[in-house]
Image (cartoon, rainbow, N blue to C red):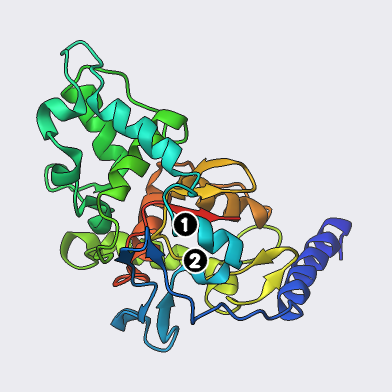
Amino acid sequence: MTIRAKTLAGLASAAALMIGTAALAEPDLDAVLVINDETELTTITAAPEHLEGALEQAISGWHYRDAATRGMEMDDFENPAMAFVDEGLASWDAVDGSEGKSCASCHGDISESMKGLRASLPKVNPENGELWSMEDYINDCRTNRMGAEAWDWDKDPMKNMTAAISVQSRGMPVDVAIDGPAAPFWEQGKEMYYTRYGLLQLSCANCHEENNGHYIRADHLSQGQTNAFPVFRLKTDGLVSLHNRFAGCVRDTRAETFKKGGPEFHALELYVASRGNGLSIEGVGVRP
């Protein structure tokens, strides 16, 4: 066996050992997420039928966090993400681009026009047959209606706007379509979810399906649900987009990651979102 082969085998064995011996710390399933003492969210629900044999329940990542972190999300005055939501709301009303328009010029009151959108995304755009995330719709409006430049998927203006739009669906159940024109994208995402990547040869399922509830190093593995995204990460002191989190997970396997906003992560976003159908949109979550 070559030195490289020995190294690869050793890394894969180390990853398997690391997961196999990870400490178990069950999530606090008795905790109840009520925001601002008025809005109770569904954070545990029966797993969708397509997960039969894999998971019995879909559980929000909120339950896997410590009490202090959970508490931040229960009060908008303590939730650090809400400052970025305010920035997004300001951008909603700001005129930008050659057409002299703002988001509000076409869509009006964000609380009315954007209600429910986050819960249904990603979805197939019937005009082009492509699977679109919220960021795609935002940039389509900016470039084709406002005459403004597209925003980078992972920069503050985009993350702030997705946060502001997500809040409008808070408490509504995730309900992404996986049949009809969405079916081939869903199948692609499912294949990715169970494919092992990188030198460590780990799949999404290895951590989030087979070992959720365990600790790997300092990370308390959850089911990897997406209903709280974008989330405020205490580790980075800022908002993190879903595709950024996907890229981080792939990178942690020591693989070359896919492009944020690329077709691979679009498909993965749909499949992972479908695993949480029925969970409430948290808009916007707090995570370590």
- Give the quarter of the figure containing the N terminus: bottom right
Callout in the foreground (1, 2):
1
Residue at point 29%, 38% (across, down):
136
Q: Position of residue 175 (x, y in %)?
A: 24, 65
Q: Nearer the viewer, residue 25 or 134?
A: 25
Residue denoted by label 2: 62
Q: Nearer the viewer, residue 40 or 180?
A: 40
Q: Is residue 150 left or right of residue 109?
A: right
Residue at point 47%, 57% (across, down):
73
Q: Is residue 97 left or right of residue 230?
A: left
**Badge 2, how many Cα within 10 Å: few under 14, some, many 20+?**
many
Res 48 label = none
Q: Which badge, 1 or 2, comes first in the chain's sequence? A: 2
- Give the quarter of the figure containing the C terminus: bottom right
Q: How many marks?
A: 2
**Badge 1, how many Cα within 10 Å: few under 14, some, many 20+?**
many
- Three-letter amino acid code at the position of disc 1: Glu
Q: Position of residue 245 (x, y in %)?
A: 53, 51
Residue denoted by label 1: 73
Q: Position of residue 33 (x, y in %)?
A: 41, 68
Q: Residue furthest front?
A: 37
Q: Are marks 1 and 2 in contact (CB under 8 Å)?
A: yes
Residue at point 40%, 68% (across, down):
190
Taking the image as drawn, is residue 133 in sight? no
Taking the image as drawn, is residue 18 in sight? yes
Q: Position of residue 89 (x, y in %)?
A: 30, 33
**In the figure, residue 106 lies in which quadrant?**
top left
State the SS at label 1: helix
